[in-house]
């Protein structure tokens, strides 16, 4: 176990809020990282999905849940300290709203690299993965679950299409976890 040295808030699988004083990034656990702005409906798809998964997978003690918000460099340590990473985020998949797609391993890297659009966030997921790669700490098992957004407007709840995709995201997450056993 490696201690995190960044001020982040996390939820462990018992749904306890973890603060810097009691966070330990256990590389034997899978980190599920939800990213996005949960105040902009479907832009927060990753956060909404992470919250759904936290409830659906509450019996799993091998998972750490992290609300990555709109990303920042403080997430680099959490990513570097895990060997298994599942990221969930809204993504332009050129598909119908609520469509989900899994990108695993090199497919994730290729998807992130091919979608180098400007980010309104402090740092992009591609930047964080590049930091981990340069530090030779890129998670060996990594996956991105992209969710096609429908509505990016003020609101704390996802659109009907994205909300309906949550069970599919849960199924895809479980399939990834089973494949990594």
Image (cartoon, rainbow, N blue to C red):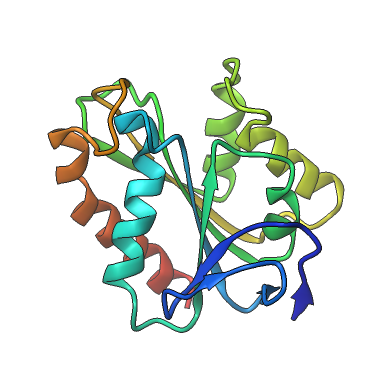
Which residue is at a point 66% across and 61% down the rendered structure image?
140
Residue at the farthest top position: 118
Which residue is at a point 57% across and 16% down the rendered structure image?
117
Q: Position of residue 85 (x, y in %)?
A: 56, 59
User: Which quadrant of the figure contains the N terminus?
Assistant: bottom right
Nearest the eye: 105 or 148? 148
Which residue is at a point 36% across and 28% down the rendered structure image?
40
As drawn, is 73 to the left or to the right of 146? Answer: right
Nearest the eye: 79 or 70? 70
Residue 128 seen anywhere in this rendered image of the structure: yes
Q: Is residue 115 above or below residue 65?
A: above
Which residue is at a point 54% across and 69% down the rendered structure image?
30
Q: Position of residue 81 (x, y in %)?
A: 73, 65
How many numbered markers are drawn? 0
Residue 148 seen anywhere in this rendered image of the structure: no
As drawn, is 9 to the left or to the right of 135? Answer: left
Nearest the eye: 10 or 164? 10
Instruction: Find residue 60 and report its image quarter.
Output: bottom left
As drawn, is 124 to the left or to the right of 158? Answer: right
Nearest the eye: 143 or 43? 43
Q: Position of residue 63 (x, y in %)?
A: 49, 73
Q: Position of residue 78 (x, y in %)?
A: 69, 59
Residue at the farthest right position: 135
As drawn, is 38 to the left or to the right of 77? Answer: left
């Amino acid at each position: 176990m490696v201690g995190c040295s960044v001020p982040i808030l996390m939820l462990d699988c018992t749904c306890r809020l973890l603060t810097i004083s009691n966070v330990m990034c256990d590389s034997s656990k899978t980190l599920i990282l939800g990213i996005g702005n949960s105040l902009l409906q479907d832009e927060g798809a990753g956060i909404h999905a992470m919250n759904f998964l936290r409830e659906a997978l509450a019996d799993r003690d091998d998972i750490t849940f992290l609300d990555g918000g709109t990303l920042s460099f403080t997430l680099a340590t959490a990513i570097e300290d895990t060997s298994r990473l599942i990221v969930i985020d809204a993504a332009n998949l050129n598909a119908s709203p609520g469509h989900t797609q899994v990108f695993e391993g090199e497919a994730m890297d290729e998807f992130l690299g091919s979608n180098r659009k400007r980010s309104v966030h402090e740092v992009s997921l591609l930047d964080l993965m590049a930091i981990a790669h340069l530090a030779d700490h890129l998670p060996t098992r990594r996956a991105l679950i992209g969710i096609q957004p429908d509505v990016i407007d003020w609101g704390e709840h996802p659109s009907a299409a994205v909300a309906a995709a949550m069970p599919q995201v849960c199924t895809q997450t479980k399939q990834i976890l089973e494949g990594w056993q």
